[in-house]
Amino acid sequence: MALSEYRFRRRVQFYETDVAGIVHFSWFFRYMEEAEHALWREAGLSIHPPDSDIGWPRIATSFEFVRPLRFEDEFDVHLRVAEMTKKTIRYECTLTKNDEKIASGSMTIACVRKKPTMQGIEIPQEIADRIRAGR
């Protein structure tokens, strides 16, 4: 069965906060990527297997912030595969705390052959069979 989404709960660590005591914006992108990697593992895959000749560079990413997160806050990360083309995967991500939206974002990754020079290629069928766009 192909996966199209992944959810998990996380707690804000002190090192993720800035001098104002709120999570630094850069961490939201890490949370999204953490969910992406977990989705791939859940699908029986790795986004970066050893000795792989393909890679997944990020070609677009964004976040809109609604409310702050602070040290020790527990929050949920929900990642969804919003769209899959022959060569790209676009995720949508929502972070919530107590069912209240904290932030939402998106990230698009491209499938590339890494050598001899980086070049876009079609997503291998083995991966397309295990990850799919959700509704």
Image (tube, rainbow, N blue to C red):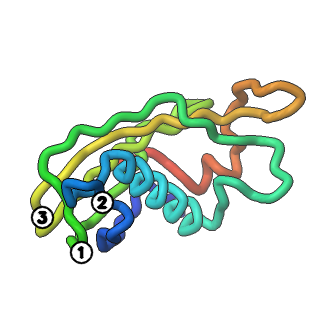
Most foreground residue, 60 or 45? 60
Most foreground residue, 1 or 75? 75
The answer to whether residue 12 is above or below residue 78 is below
Q: Earlier in the sequence, mark 3 or mark 2?
A: 2
Q: Earlier in the sequence, mark 3 or mark 1?
A: 1
Q: Amino acid at mark 2?
A: Thr
Q: Secondary structure at mark 3?
A: loop
**Residue 6 has which mark?**
none
- Spatial CA distance of label 3 from label 2 is 22 Å
Tell whether label 2 touches label 3 (CB within 8 Å).
no
Q: Which residue is mark 3?
A: 99
- Spatial CA distance of label 2 from label 1 is 10 Å
- Spatial CA distance of label 3 from label 1 is 17 Å
Asked whether residue 135 appears in the rendered view, the answer is no
The answer to whether residue 41 is above or below residue 122 is below
Q: Percent from the top left, x then y, of residue 116? A: 89, 28
Report the residue at 12% width, 64% height from top: 99
Q: Which residue is mark 2?
A: 17
Numbered label tally? 3
Q: Percent from the top left, x then y, of residue 2? A: 52, 58
Q: Residues within 10 Å of mark 1 (few under 14, many from 20)?
A: few
Q: Which residue is mark 1?
A: 72
Q: Earlier in the sequence, mark 2 or mark 1?
A: 2
Residue 48 sits in which quadrant? bottom right
Q: Percent from the top left, x then y, of residue 114? A: 79, 35
Q: Residues within 10 Å of mark 3 (few under 14, many from 20)?
A: few
Q: Amino acid at mark 1?
A: Glu
